[in-house]
Image (spheres, rainbow, N blue to C red):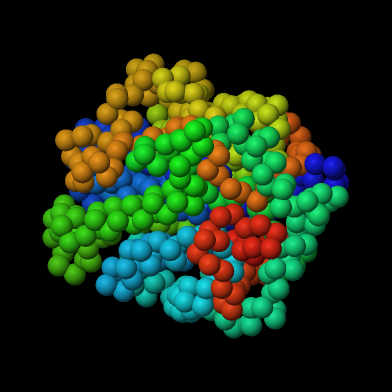
Amino acid sequence: MTTPAGSGSGFGSVSWWGLSPALDLQAESPPVDPESQAVTEHKIPELDVLLLGSVDGRHMLRTLARAALWPLRRFNFYVLENNLEAVARHMLIFSLALEEPEKMGLQERSETFLELWGNALLRPSVAAFVRTQASLLAQLVPEPDRLEEQLPWLSLRSLKFRERDALEAVFRFWSGGEKGPEVFPMSRLWDSRVRHYLGSRYDARRGVADWDLSMKLHDRGRGEQVAARGYWGDIATGPFVAYGIEADDQSLLRRSNGQPVKTASEITQHNVTELFKEVATWRGPGATQQNQEETKSPEADVPTQEPFTMHFLPLNSSQTLHHKSCYQGRFQLLYVSCGMVHLLSPELGACVAPGGNLVVELARYLVDIRPKELKAFSDRVGEIAQAAGFAPHTGTTPSETFARFYKLGDSSRGCGDSALEAKVLAPPPEAMSPPQADQATSLEAVSPPQADLVPPLEAMNPPQADQVSSLEAVSPPQAVLVPPLEAMNPPQADQAPPLEAMSPPQADLAPPLEVKSSP
């Protein structure tokens, strides 16, 4: 239903970027138990993380970039999304982020990443990269052995055969099997969504974004589905929340006469460039040699392991993972996006180790949600987490962006080991920030994670539209309806917006890369 304030459907049914700043997952996980470090598969401590709806890989990239500040640890990221286009997006983003410096320079890689991350209309050079990379990935997806040989950080073995086939079809579509502009008129599809979203305010759409920024974000600190090709992503909240509202370099957040001196796009460009630089340093020759020494196997033919692996899980497996013994009590950290909170259940909680942590993304930056609904949603998250066997962290600073919990000691949710619960409730200070003695980079370049800074929201520039949300106050945002696999998203190879178009797409600018099916 369209109201004078908008239809309330700006979030869409598919998420292409996160609604919260990137986290260092090591800082969110319990401290490493020294007694458990001695014997592991790779002879170094491991961190097993399960992420539901992380969408754009920002938390994993941030974790890898900060890894040099922590003692050596191997990461196992288990990623569960609700559509295969999101899986393809992860693979494309990481293949770019981990590109060899000899093939693509730091600045070019950063600019290409930002364009893929927040735009659907691409410059010819970026569109050519998408076609080439998608073609390569389409060839590797059906062959797991060859895939893990060329991309040792990636594992698709848990996906079902039909999901691999559909994933291959996504990459075939992106590689240019069909002519994009003729088959997929992105500008018209975007305009159609905006017309429905704004209703009677469509003619004033250019001023609507400023209204939403001033009247909403400033107060917050900144049936069966039918396959149909279209743009079903977010048209209200822009992509800059992930990298554009926080910074380790506090000078980027400085204000002059009450106004930010840097825009969200400038902060994002800086943060992404520094992130890629830190990841490259961490994965450089020195780090690789150290990892080889730590993971050396007595068998000469065993290949050297990458310091991290991304495992993609079947789309609808959140309620069945606990049936496999390999996942029961395995994960030290569970991350759930605000659009997938409804999947948090006792069955999923059974996959988290006692004393493990849970981080839930809240709906703080959803402009369609009113303040009273934000409060109701936060309360509902607490109820769902408690029913799943978690208790709120009382030793952490309250946050409006994330809700943090810990797993109780046993299934009785109250009869667990009191010593264990006390340890998790009040973790040592070094557990929440990188140990300073092990820093591999200068402190000026990297500082301990600032997870809950309140950034200057004037720097944000999303293409929001002021509307009254029709969401029920006690239900999580319905942003993750499982769409049909037939709806593929093409890269727009023949459209070339300037790099300055990295701000969230307006009605006539560049929307996000992927396209999805409608509910």
Q: Does residue 191 appear left or right of residue 54 in this picture?
A: right
- 343 over 155 or under it: above or below: above
On the question of residue 416 being in view, the answer is no
Q: Quadrant of residue 254?
A: top left
Give the x, y percent position of residue 414: 49, 18
Residue beneath the point at 64% across and 63% down = 509
Q: Quadrant of residue 378?
A: top right
Q: Does residue 508 appear left or right of residue 102 in this picture?
A: right
- 193 over 101 or under it: above or below: above
Residue beneath the point at 15% across and 54% down = 290
Which of 254 and 34 lies nearest the eye of the viewer? 254
Residue beneath the point at 86% across and 46% down = 1
Give the x, y percent position of residue 436: 20, 34
Give the x, y percent position of residue 376: 68, 27
Which of 185 and 163 lies nearest the eye of the viewer? 185
Q: Does residue 357 appear left or right of residue 504 in this picture?
A: left
Give the x, y percent position of residue 146: 37, 75
Residue beneath the point at 36% across and 39% down = 251
